[in-house]
Image (cartoon, rainbow, N blue to C red):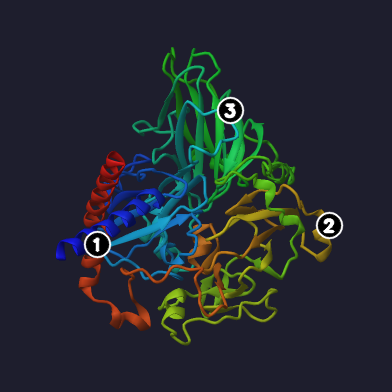
Amino acid sequence: MALCRGLSLLAIHIALLASLCSAADLFVYFDFEVSYITASPLGVPQQVIAINGKFPGPTINVTTNNNVVVNVRNKLDESLLIHWSGIQQRRSSWQDGLLGTNCPIPPKWNWTYQFQVKDQVGSFFYFPSLHFQRASGGFGGFIINNRAIIPIPFDTPDGDITILIGDWYTRNHTALRKTLDAGKGLGMPDGVLINGKGPYQYNTTLVPDGIDYETIEVHPGKTYRIRVHNVGISTSLNFRIQNHNLLLAETEGSYTVQQNYTSLDIHVGQSYSFLVTMDQNASTDYYIVASARFVNESQWKRVTGVAILHYTNSKGKARGPLPEGPNDEFDKTFSMNQARSIRWNVSASGARPNPQGSFRYGSINVTEVYVLRNKPPEMIDGKRRATLSGISFVNPSTPIRLADWFKVKGAYKLDFPTKPVTGPPRMETSVINGTYRGFMEVILQNNDTKMHAYHMSGYAFFVVGMDYGEWTDNSRGTYNKWDGIARTTTQVYPGAWTAILVSLDNVGIWNLRTENLDSWYLGQETYVRVVNPEATNKTEFPIPDNALFCGALSHLQKPEDISAATAITGDRLKMFFTLLMTMCAMLVLFH
């Protein structure tokens, strides 16, 4: 009798296991050890943030619907969060890696992120989101590939190359932070890095000896997908490759109408992928250039980033002057028109087989409108702060999502204004109350004198319009309601506006911020709270077992919680799924 019961239970377990084997999406694992190392990207030894001893960090390469498990060991001397920029974290803002949603990982502790890259493809990146740490590194690429059954709208490239560009200071992030805390600006950066390295010595006056530069080796006649991310602090960069056309194919998860550019402006926080064919002769190597935009060019020449494109049969070094960038000093609309030319490929399949344009955003009724205005930093209560609509955001001691879950009162205010406040600026933890399944229109009005880029976590939004001057209701007549690009980070030109539309179908607490790291640090951000009002909320994953606690909930945190969570989600989880896959294989064999 006992044997029969045992066999029955075994049969049930085998049946359950068989269903799990056929239905489960693949788990992929990464270990990140975040630490300081000494590097000299501009020829000056300095402290940088490395991942697994490397600067920049490794590229995460996964496939749509994979479950991603990243075990992070914080070996810094300060707290840490890793933010997955552009990864939409469907139903799980718990994993977003920002102070509005997560408590920081303390120094010397482990914490494991686990999320699914659900229904996403494209080019993204990750970075540390606290304490101005991105200015010292800790960033890397994040690729989400199509599933094999979903075609890509171009021939399969012969290779895939990730390029990280960004402005850089020889002072580390703690020194830069102190400068901002003292009420001062950061000044001109010391250089522009390409994949964590300084410029090739194309000019002996501007570039000193002994600087290590990036070399990207390619095969003649081959076509490569080159993914370029601006991971810098606050400088817009123009990207170009000498004598090569950049065929734009995708940006931040959306396939674009394919157009050739000789160069493209890439603003802070933005990602693009180009198809580049190696169709030039191999008499020399070629320059890869990332140069500052919207600045005094003569003063900024020394900070230009230069890498080398090396054909395997190249006969000599790159030579001559750098390829010129846009010469539009007296044409304010050149870069904006270039941005407007980037269109959504409405006939291409995205992460799913249906065309991208099957979501007819232009025919959806707008349910809520927010006009967000930024201005140059100003003094609030004796501190130099940056604002959105007159409010400088103060991060709560208890993260907003955690406060909601445990009903902590007073952690934040759900009162962010729909229009800029007219009174004196103030410092608040003020949050936008988004309507679940609503369709929000956000106008980003840049009344600052410098370029800004804005990012929204949890979503891809549609960029439907941009122009110089003040936005008015009549500006809607200029909107692109058919093939405006869907992306996660958009630029807003000085003295101009950009309008975006976003469908609020992803519950959680989502950050809306400037990507300019100095203005973000000084408070130019808010959060959008999207809650399903139904009593049985099955649209969001529950709080993870390894959640960290801080602020009003600090008493819930126990040191052993971390070790237990890490043990389960780290090596033991790997072991469990290895065993599971082995048993799956055995089931297939015996069937």
| Residue at the spot 61% in from the left edge and 72% down from the top edge | 434
| Residue named by callout 3 | 323
Residue 221 at x, y = what percent? 51, 17
Q: Earlier in the sequence, mark 3 or mark 2?
A: 3
Residue 70 at x, y = what percent? 33, 54
> Quick check: 240 above or below 374?
above
The amino acid sitting under disc 1 is: Leu
Q: How crowded is the residue under tag 2: few (<14 C-alpha within 10 Å), some, or many (20+)? A: few
Q: Earlier in the sequence, mark 1 or mark 2?
A: 1
Which mark is nearer the camera, 1 or 3? 1
Residue 224 at x, y = what percent? 50, 28
Q: Earlier in the sequence, mark 1 or mark 3?
A: 1
The amino acid sitting under disc 3 is: Pro
Q: CA distance from mark 1 to mark 3?
A: 71 Å
Q: Nearer the viewer, residue 118 or 409?
A: 118
In the displayed orientation, state which residue is furthest to the bottom. Answer: 409
| Residue named by callout 1 | 9
| Residue at the spot 55% in from the left edge and 18% down from the top edge | 279
Q: CA distance from mark 1 to mark 2?
A: 66 Å
Q: How crowded is the residue under tag 3: few (<14 C-alpha within 10 Å), some, or many (20+)? A: some
The answer to which image quadrant residue 585 occupies is top left
| Residue at the spot 75% in from the left edge and 49% down from the top edge | 482
| Residue named by callout 2 | 477
